[in-house]
Image (cartoon, rainbow, N blue to C red):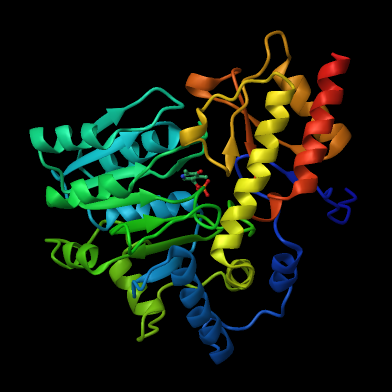
Amino acid sequence: MTNYTDLNTSERILLGPGPSTAHPRVLRAMAQPLVGHLDPQFLKVMDETQELLRFVFQTENELTLPISATGSAGMEAALCNFIEPGDEVLIGVIGYFGERLCDMAARYGANVRKLEKPWGEVIDPAEIEAELKAKPAKIVAMVHAETSTGAWQPVEEISRIVHNYGGLFLLDCVTSLGGLPVKIDEWEVDIAYSAAQKCLSCPPGLAPLTINDRAREVMCKRKKPTSNWYLDLCLLDNYWGDVRTYHHTAPISTIFALREGLRLAYEEGLEARFKRHRKNAELLWAGFEAMGIELHVPVEIRLPTLTTPRIPDGVDDMLVRKRLLDEYNVEIAGGFSQLAGQVWRIGLMGYSSRRENVTLLLAALKEILNSV
Ligand SMILES: *Cc1c(COP(=O)(O)O)cnc(C)c1O
């Protein structure tokens, strides 16, 4: 008989593009006894989770809820509820996750137009304006924090332009929410989604999503319901809204986790939280500069939540990452596609964004690079 041992995972320090390290308080919240998904105790948890989501999204949007699946499901819900076959959709592609938006939008029958940039750059508002002037779009979608490159896309002015041309502005906030300012109402972002396992210090499994009244109106005017039953926001709104009609069994323990992750953000305060992310990122950047290692993204558009140092010539990418994991319990990631073998991807997100993690990583890298 096979001896299946108790699970005994290492206390890894997760400094990759996600998941980031879950906060101990989040893991404790997950271990609470299970209650039913219509138990009054759970209904209260749902209400509080929605309130806290509005807090981190900086929005009053009523339709704000966690989708019961990972960030990609948030992306899919953000597209499938608004796209009808033949719709014009303009997508800003500054890396891998922009490509994924294009793939999904096309599957729902959109005429996808791509505005593409080399990996590490961002899109200029004037370029969006020129595209919309040539041909309007029902939806303009882009990624706020491109986890594949480390670039931070400015969006405020683009949102204004999109509305001037009568479109909806859709924003992927997966690697920004909880780590840098995401001002849904002030910027008039119509549709936004994120993921629990990046800057919110939770395990993967939930995708916070919010839409405003402008987006809701477009959704309600559809000729036919979306072909995706599970992610239909009209049905989900009946479950998460006042009616609380059963739709699917909420992942109770994962929602306990999200509530705790959000409560941590609330206690810390958004400004203090963004400052912490910034400070730790600057410490990391200074460390790389002192080691003579170049950073792929210029400082003006560099994300504090994800840094992409260029791998020095002659250094074995895989070997360095393996030694970091084996000898220091630290996980970072490599680049892929356009940046394969060229950069490392280092996330300082949520609970992972701590000074001691930065100093450990820099010291470990120095030791490894000196010994190869
Ligand atoms: C991680 C990520 C996603 C996808 O989220 P999953 O939880 O892996 O499904 C989408 N967009 C961005 C920018 C991401 O970093």
Which residue sits at x=40%, y=40%?
153
Query: Is 265 placed left or right of 369 in the picture?
Result: left
Query: Is 351 placed left or right of 142 in the picture?
Result: right
Question: Where the C terminus falls, by quadrant?
Answer: top right
Q: Is residue 151 above or below residue 60?
A: above
Q: Is residue 187 visible?
A: yes
Which residue sits at x=68%, y=49%?
353
Q: Is residue 269 above or below residue 127?
A: below
Residue at the extreme bottom of the image, as rendered: 40
Closer to the camera, 275 or 13?
A: 275
Provide residue 162's location: percent of width, then percent of height.
20, 47
Closer to the camera, 233 or 169?
A: 169
Which residue sits at x=80%, y=39%?
359
Provide residue 2's location: percent of width, then percent of height.
88, 48
Q: Is residue 237 above or below residue 138?
A: below
Number of labelled discs? 0
Query: Is 207 placed left or right of 15 in the picture?
Result: left
Provide residue 90's location: percent of width, then percent of height.
22, 39
Which residue sits at x=9%, y=32%?
134
Which corner quadrant of the image does residue 144 belong to?
A: top left
Closer to the camera, 176 or 113?
A: 176
Q: Is residue 349 visible?
A: no
Provide residue 183's location: percent of width, then percent of height.
39, 59
